Image (cartoon, coloured by chain):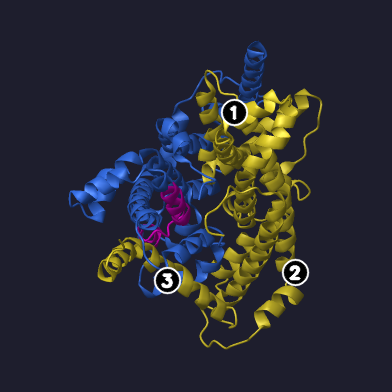
Chain colours: A yellow, B blue
Amino acid sequence: MSPAPARRRREALIAYAFVSPWIIGFVSLLAIPLLVSGYLSLTDYELLRPGTELVGAGNYREAFTDDESFRQALSVTARFVLLVVPLDLAAGLGLALLLNVGGRGSALLRTLYFVPVALTGVAGSLAWLWILEPSYGLVNNALSVVGVDGPAWLVSSDSALLGVALITLWTSVGRSMLITLAALRGVPAELLEAATVEGAGRLRRLMRVTLPLITPALFFNLVLGVITNFQAFVQVFVTTAGGPGQSTLVYALYLYRQAFESFRLGYASALAWILLGIVLMFTALLFASSRLWVHYEAEPRR
Amino acid sequence: MIERRTRNRRAGLALGWILVILYLLPFAWMVSSSLKSTAEIFSLPPTWVPTSPRLDNYAEATTAIPFWRYFANSVLVATVATTGTVVSCSLVAYGFARLRARGLRILFPVVLGTIMLPSVVTLVPQYLLFRSLGWVGTYLPLIVPSWLGAGLSGAFSIFLLRQFFLTISPEQDEAARVEGAGSLRILLRVILPQAKPALAVVAVFDFIAHWNDLLTPLIYLNRSELFTLPQGLASFRDIYTTQWNLLMAGSVLAVLPVLVLMLLAQRLLDRGIVIGRS
């Protein structure tokens, strides 16, 4: 017996009523701003200067041909993402596998690994500014104990990006570990036992049963990692402010400066859309590749 | 065979403990530095345990800048924003999980898609929007989006909650409906009480995000009385450039609330994440 159309309509209305906060938020804070920023990117709008004109692709042209800082920002950010994301994934996976053994105290251990996530942001970045201090900080002193001369980290343009990457990794590994661990726990024990019965050793069980089953979580970490780190901002703003010599000028910082220090809102909008384009391309590539290596459970409507 | 598993387990755990100590060394260093005198901070080789711990650093750090005002501001913003996220995302997730309507099936992937939208794209137009509303210089741009499921972790929270709601068996829903309960009452009386782990995860993640957020306050708050703690700390750094002991004291204080929150929610954090199921 199917419900009468009137009742179904009422149910639909109620459903939309519940979802309405998101709809309002989406339209007013996402969809419309997205369109507006697209429009602005085609103008030379500056907040503090009257008289705005349409410049079409002018901003985009300026970015790619005239703006050295833009190219530098792209290069820095690309290198940063390529450095941080694979390491974050690998470390998260490694730790999750390690902590998946369970046993006494493993819950406490898990929480402890998550502690640094609390230090994302200014406080953690300040701490790492001190930790990476070339002469008195923890890292270089620890390195000198094993006879290694540590680099100048955030003070030198050769190593500053590495320093920023280190800070980022330290605060993000806990999160990817948690997500990977949650997925590991979802691996049905029966499958592992069946594999053991068939004589599969630990490595083979890992490669043939566990890893394929957690690829959705790994994929999730990968995509989220790329998107988040393309927009890295705070750790750079607090520690190096893009320097020394623009060696840590991440894209988000450059955009922020164009928008809220130079108030070139039209140009900044173009920069934002360029980033959007890059991230979308990257994401599309990742999704396309996912068919090759991500194993989804049977989904009802696909 | 069981013996080997226990041995492996113990070895794994041992390694895990060794690694975590290494992993948390920076944090220990931060705390230790916060208790040192300026002279001891710059001594080589560095000491781990301060020779004479100075709690004065904390007093100095909290008086050099209006620390507790910034702290209170952050508490206000983060609490109100997180409440908004929990409320609005519960409503929305419930709509997606339990209620049926044409079009909802198409909308949910859109929600997921917004997780992947780089937020920098909406930065400028949102600024212009809030500016035209006269909200620049107030806390409204920091708080209102969360009440529309569009806060710092809005879409992700909706996703998490919906996934969790889907795992709650609909029997109790139906029983309540037979007794005449409306959808809202079912949400409040049946679903939410069973969803505490997921709600805790959402609340903790969202609170941490708002507590640590620098970008939004940087853009919208121009009067220093309104600064949140991240902003305050950043300005602190400008004043006390190399007085690391004071900077560390301030940072430790800034981080404590989040740590406490995480420890309290520890048990719920694991249970609340349900991924990999549609």
Give the residue pinned by disc 2: A68
One can see residue A248 in this view: no
Q: Chain of mark 1?
A: A
Q: Chain of mark 2?
A: A
Q: Are marks 1 and 2 on the same chain?
A: yes
Three-letter amino acid code at disc 2?
A: Glu
Three-letter amino acid code at disc 3?
A: Val
One can see residue A27 in this view: yes
Query: Where is residue A282 drawn, in percent x and y?
Result: 68, 61
In terms of image quadrants, where is residue A27? Answer: bottom left
Q: Residue at x 31, y 63 (%)?
A: A2
Which is more N-terminal, label 3 or label 2? 3
Q: Decide whether residue A295 is among the magenta residues.
A: no
Q: Decide whether residue B159 is among the magenta residues.
A: yes
Query: Where is residue A26 drawn, in percent x and y?
Result: 43, 67
Q: Residue at x 45, y 44 (%)?
A: B205
